[in-house]
């Protein structure tokens, strides 16, 4: 200890003080980390970089292990939120579609204030290849009766109720061979009878018969209900004329009509439970 | 006539019939082939009759017919009678002269569909005066659309009937 304090010790102490002062002056003058840092930087930077990366990786692993449960819970919560958002989106789409239908229906209702409508849903279609009918979700308990016309929200005629129970009803469509509807050409006022035919109904078409002459009906003309007989309200759109022909005898002209209603694709329909008979 | 546990047959054939009815009244009322809806219940009756014989064929045909009338949305018992009788007759043929195999199945399906179409056409011709030529066109479409499904229905029926 004595030797250390003597010569060597004094030299070391002086050197240390000089280095300390030099470092302090260097830091004070440069405003940075000083010459020591400048000297050590090239040696330690790669090592520090590797160490930082290593520590960072270890921290991630540790964090993953430590926060696994937390992440799992967060993941479950996010999944729930996504499911809810998807459900909201589906609901929104349904509401949007329903809104569009109701707006269209409102337009129809404003044009036909006398008509009372009951909304229904299609439950099932017949499996038959020889007829066209379907079952709807309401029956007599909702005020439905035999013979009530069924329409789309646009007011296109779909068919007529042909059998009814308290909770459901069978609708025979306009293309079925058992249904006949008093009709007229909207453009000319030419009258006829629209009815399904076995040669047309597999293709989803129907025939307008008993028209006076072929020249009075043109392709593209709109066929509407005439209202005669009081079964259907006047002015319901049945469809458009797609071709004009004559019967095999060559005497009776008839027009082939494509229904305006998407009969096979209808899911939400309206039953006309009451209307003012225009005769 | 084949042997087997009655309970096992009921356990296997009841859900099979229910599943077929659901398919017939939902999927196959929208799925059209050649512009016609296929009739899979009669194919199932032919399958059970071929592999299980007259008794099972007749009973399965009876219930399949009831469900077919429901799927047709009609109050008549047209298919109840047709499918019960064809199930019985095809079962007798299977018990006596017909060998079990796909060609036989195809043949009896064709016969069964011809009988079904004939009855449907006859009732429309008699009751509503519908022209036979137009009805024949629809009947041919219906039979062709249905016969496409004979291949899967044959193997399903064979598998189920072998399990019993």
Image (spheres, rainbow, N blue to C red):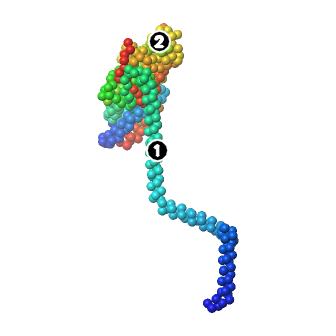
**Any part of residue B139 in sight:** no
Spot occupied by residue A151 in the image (x, y as percentages of width and height): 41, 24
Task: Name the residue that disc number 1 marks.
Answer: A85
Q: In the rendered view, would you say A66 is above or below A212?
A: below
Q: Which mark is residue A163?
A: none
Mark 1, secondary structure of its residue: helix
Q: Name the subunit of mark 1.
A: A
Decide if residue A140 is on the left or right side of residue A209: left
Find out whether the residues at labels 1 and 2 contact each other: C-beta distance under 8 Å.
Answer: no
Task: Name the residue that disc number 2 marks.
Answer: A189
Query: Depth check: A24 or A196 in front?
Result: A24
Q: Residue at x 42, y 23 (%)?
A: A110
Q: Which of the image's four quarters has the N terminus of chain B?
A: top left
Decide if residue A254 is on the left or right side of residue B77: right
Q: Residue at x 62, y 67 (%)?
A: A48
Q: CA distance from mark 1 to mark 2?
A: 53 Å
**Any part of residue B23 in sight:** yes
Query: Depth check: B50 or A204 in front?
Result: A204
Spot occupied by residue A90 in the image (x, y as percentages of width and height): 45, 39
Mark 2, secondary structure of its residue: loop
Query: Depth check: A138 or A276 in front?
Result: A276
């Amino acid at each position: 200890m004595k030797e250390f304090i003597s010569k060597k010790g004094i030299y070391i102490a002086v050197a240390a003080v000089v280095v300390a002062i030099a470092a302090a002056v260097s830091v004070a003058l440069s405003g940075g980390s000083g010459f020591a840092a400048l000297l050590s930087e090239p040696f330690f930077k790669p090592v520090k970089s590797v160490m930082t990366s290593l520590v960072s990786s270890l921290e991630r692993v540790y964090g993953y292990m430590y926060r696994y449960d937390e992440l799992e819970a967060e993941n479950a919560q996010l999944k729930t939120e996504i499911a809810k958002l998807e459900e909201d989106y589906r609901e929104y789409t349904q509401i949007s579609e329903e809104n569009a239908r109701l707006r269209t229906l409102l337009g129809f209702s404003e044009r036909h204030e006398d008509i009372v409508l009951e909304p229904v849903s299609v439950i099932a279609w017949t499996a038959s290849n020889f007829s066209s009918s379907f079952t709807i979700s309401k029956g007599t308990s909702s005020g439905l009766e035999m013979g009530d016309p069924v329409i789309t929200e646009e007011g296109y005629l779909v068919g007529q109720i042909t059998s009814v129970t308290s909770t459901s009803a069978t609708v025979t469509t306009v293309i079925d061979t058992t249904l006949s509807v008093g009709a007229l050409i909207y453009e000319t006022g030419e009258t006829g009878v629209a009815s399904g035919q076995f040669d047309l109904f597999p293709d989803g078409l129907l025939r307008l018969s008993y028209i006076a002459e072929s020249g009075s009906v043109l392709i593209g003309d709109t066929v509407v209900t005439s209202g005669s007989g009081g079964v259907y309200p006047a002015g319901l759109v049945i469809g458009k004329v797609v071709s004009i022909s004559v019967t095999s005898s060559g005497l009776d002209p008839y027009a082939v009509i494509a229904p305006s209603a998407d009969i096979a694709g209808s899911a939400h329909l309206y039953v006309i439970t009451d209307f003012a008979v225009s005769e | 006539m084949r042997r087997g546990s009655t309970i096992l047959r009921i356990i296997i054939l009841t859900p099979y019939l229910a599943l077929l009815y659901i398919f017939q009244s939902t999927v196959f009322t929208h799925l059209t082939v050649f512009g016609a809806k296929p009739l899979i219940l009669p194919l199932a009756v032919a399958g059970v009759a071929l592999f299980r014989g007259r008794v099972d064929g007749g009973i399965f045909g009876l219930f399949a017919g009831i469900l077919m009338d429901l799927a047709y949305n009609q109050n008549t018992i047209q298919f109840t009678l047709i499918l019960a009788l064809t199930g019985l007759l095809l079962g007798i043929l299977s018990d006596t002269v017909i060998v079990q195999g796909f060609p036989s199945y195809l043949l009896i399906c064709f016969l069964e569909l011809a009988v079904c179409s004939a009855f449907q056409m006859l009732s429309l011709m008699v009751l509503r005066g519908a022209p036979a030529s137009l009805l024949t066109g629809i009947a041919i479409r219906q039979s062709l659309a249905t016969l496409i499904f004979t291949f899967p229905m044959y193997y399903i029926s064979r598998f189920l009937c072998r399990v019993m």
